[in-house]
Image: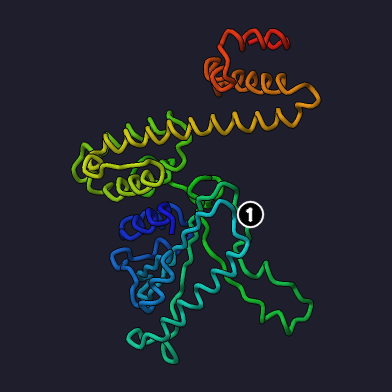
Amino acid sequence: MGQQDIAHKEFYSHPENVKDLIQGFVALDCVEQFDFSTLERDNSSYTEKEKNERHDDIVWRLKCRDEWVYIYIIIEFQSDEDETMPVRIMSYLSLLYLNLLANKNLGYGKDKKLPIVLPIVLYNGKYDWNVTKNIQDMIEDTQDNSLQKFIPKLSYYFIDEIRPNANEKDSVFAGLTNSVIATMKLQRAISREDFDKLAEELKVIFKDEKQKQRFSSFVTFMLRLLSTKLDKIDYEKAKSLDEVIRMTYTFIDREIENGVKNGIEKEIKNAEKNAEKKGEKKGKISAFYDLIKKGLITLEQAASSLGISPKQLLDDFKEYNLVL
């Protein structure tokens, strides 16, 4: 399990965060009927062996009109969408139901029907999620009415942590009112300016001791994510919000630097492909000229990468009629 998955699993091990996720991002009428005072982590539906194997499962349950509803949170942070998700959901729920039936203390079986399960998929990948949300859509249709009843129908509820427009309901715009919204804002902060706004909101919140306690799981979440990106973290110092924010800026600066490097490498590779047409030197000079014009790097950074002086680079630009 990756550190990002661990961060999310730890975060959603807190009942208040599960409540905030459901209330803030699940657009279902039944949510109004959920009794969150009954919300409890389900540890009875798996054997010890399965708990170890199925480490990314987060299962809670609560009462809805005096009936138990199971909340099954699936962490899905691959780089790409997973077209098998509907089949996986069916498999997960089948195993959950089998274990509920096997647990005699729960009493499910002939005289007691199995509970409703609400599967929630949390996604944080690079690309849009264009996977069907119902397994019925993956199965060959049939004109034979007698076979129609054998086609399963099972959906999952999808929440995209990065792209608000992909969600049926998204409470991030409502202000920094809970830790779940803070995690969403953190992951959507694509610039220093975005994080500046989030940091200021957090500083105001942490002045209130009750609010500070409310957001403690969010700080842990930040630290867990940072531990995947930074070499060493002093967890003693990290108890301070200011120190966590400072480390986050270090991470953001490093990401910007890496982005510039990757942009340079990509442009150079593109230039090298065209080197035969316009000459190797001109190709590289043109690539760095474009990066400077886009504001991705400075003249000095470009010259350093080429191993020449800024003055020499300016002379090369003039040679190829490239005007800054």
Instruction: Count the labels in the image.
Output: 1
Question: Looking at the image, which residue is at 43% across and 71% down?
Answer: 53
Within the image, what quadrant is residue 250 found in?
A: top left
Q: Is residue 261 above or below residue 169?
A: above
Residue extending farthest left: 209
Q: Position of residue 143 (x, y in %)?
A: 79, 77
Question: Looking at the image, which residue is at 48% across and 66% down?
Answer: 119
Q: Is residue 2 above or below residue 211?
A: below
Where, quadrant-wise, is the N terminus in this rendering?
bottom left
Question: Looking at the image, which residue is at 22% across and 39% down?
Answer: 237
Question: Looking at the image, which residue is at 79% across and 27% down?
Answer: 276
- Say which residue label 1 marks: 130
Q: Is residue 302 above or below residue 318?
A: below
Circle 1 SS class: loop
Where, quadrant-wise, is the C terminus in this rendering?
top right
Comparing 9 with 72, the one in front is: 9
**Is 246 left or right of 252, judged from the image as shown?**
left
Within the image, what quadrant is residue 249 found in?
A: top left
Residue extending farthest bottom: 110
Three-letter code for the amino acid on which mark 1 is drawn: Asn
**Is 65 left or right of 272, judged from the image as shown?**
left
Q: Position of residue 105 (x, y in %)?
A: 32, 86
Comparing 290 with 231, the one in front is: 231
Residue extending farthest right: 277
Q: Position of residue 238 (x, y in %)?
A: 25, 41
Way the structure is coloured: rainbow
Which class describes the residues within 10 Å of circle 1: few (<14), some (14-19), or many (20+)? few
Q: Position of residue 175 (x, y in %)?
A: 38, 40
